[in-house]
Amino acid sequence: MGGTSIWHWIVVGLIVVLLFGRGKISDMMGDVAKGIKAFKKGMSEDDNTPATPVQPSEPVRTLDHQAGAPTSTATTDHKVG
């Protein structure tokens, strides 16, 4: 395997600049910086507000308590083996 000398990185950098252009790369870096700032702001807002449990507006219904659900408790034998 080849080593990663400074010349390899220069060639890779030139290819990236040729493909994307200097303007697009700087715009992309600006967008990344805005995303990082927004993430940090969101994390600091989460630390300041205490967590409050969410109360459901109506009781949670399970399969056993559904309206109109059959209430039979039929059991079946399952054989293992």
Image: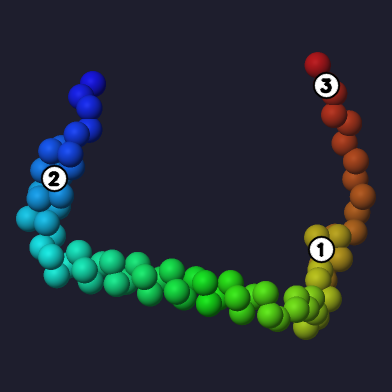
Displayed quadrant of residue 10? top left
Q: Which mark is residue 3?
A: none
Specify few, some or many for label 3: CA neighbours under 10 Å numbering under 14, 14-19, or 20 or more.
Answer: few
Task: Give the residue drawn at x 64%, y 75%.
Answer: 46
Alpha-carbon span between mark 2 and mark 1 = 63 Å
Displayed quadrant of residue 79? top right
Q: Nearer the viewer, mark 2 or mark 3?
A: 2
Q: Position of residue 69 (x, y in %)?
A: 82, 64
Task: Please tell me whether mark 3 sits on a helix, a strand or a loop.
Answer: loop
Instruction: Identify the amino acid type marked 1.
Output: Thr
State left or right for residue 34 relative to residue 30: right
Residue designated by label 3: 80
Q: Which mark is residue 10?
A: 2
Asked whether residue 55 appears in the rendered view, the answer is yes
Q: Earlier in the sequence, mark 2 or mark 1?
A: 2
Q: How many numbered circles are shown? A: 3
Q: In the rendered view of the protein, which quadrant contains the N terminus?
A: top left
Residue designated by label 1: 62
Q: Position of residue 17 (x, y in %)?
A: 11, 56
Q: Earlier in the sequence, mark 2 or mark 3?
A: 2
Task: Please tell me whether mark 1 sits on a helix, a strand or a loop.
Answer: loop
* Placement of 38 over or under 79, stated as above or below: below
